[in-house]
Image (spheres, rainbow, N blue to C red):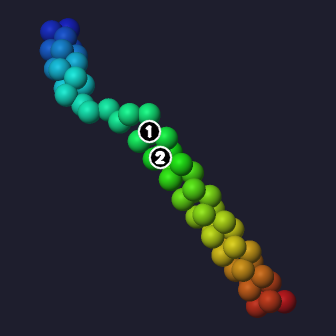
Amino acid sequence: MIEKLRTFLREAKVEIKKVTWPDRKVTTASTVVVLVVTFVVGIYLGLVDALLNQLFRLVLS
């Protein structure tokens, strides 16, 4: 069991060294894109929610 764990960790270390990590510029750009898309989708969903809320109030009253 311990030997299997050691083998796994050794192989994982080799695989991690093969990974190409993004630089700071790419990471920053990706983060900005995620934040902007999240903000836009949040506004859209908020507006749809408000619209449906008003629609249901009109239907139910």
Tell which residue pokes out farthest to the right in this image: 61
* Pointer 2 local density, CA inside 10 Å: few below 14, some 14–19, many at least 20: few
Residue found 24% across the figure and 25% down from its top: 16
Callout 1 crowding tier (Cα within 10 Å): few <14, some 14–19, many ≥20: few
The answer to whether one can see residue 8 in this image is no
Q: Which mark is residue 25?
A: 1
On the image, the x and y values in percent for residue 59 come to 76, 91
Tell whether 22 sits left or right of 28: left
Label 2 – label 1 distance at C-alpha: 6 Å
Total labels drawn: 2
* Rendered residue at 19%/11% (across/down): 6
Q: Is residue 33 left or right of residue 12?
A: right
Residue 54 in the figure: left or right of residue 29: right
Residue 13's disc number: none
Read off the residue under disc 2.
Answer: 29
Amino acid type, mark 2: Ala
Q: Secondary structure at mark 2?
A: helix
Question: Measured from the top left, where is residue 37 in percent x and y?
Answer: 54, 59
Q: Are marks 2 and 1 in contact (CB under 8 Å)?
A: yes
Residue 13 drawn above or below residue 58: above
Indicate the quadrant containing the C terminus: top left, top right, bottom left or bottom right.
Answer: bottom right
Q: Secondary structure at mark 1?
A: helix
- Is residue 58 something that shows in the picture? yes
Q: Nearer the viewer, residue 21 or 16?
A: 21
At 57% from the left and 56% from the top, the residue drawn is 36
Quadrant of the image occupied by residue 15: top left
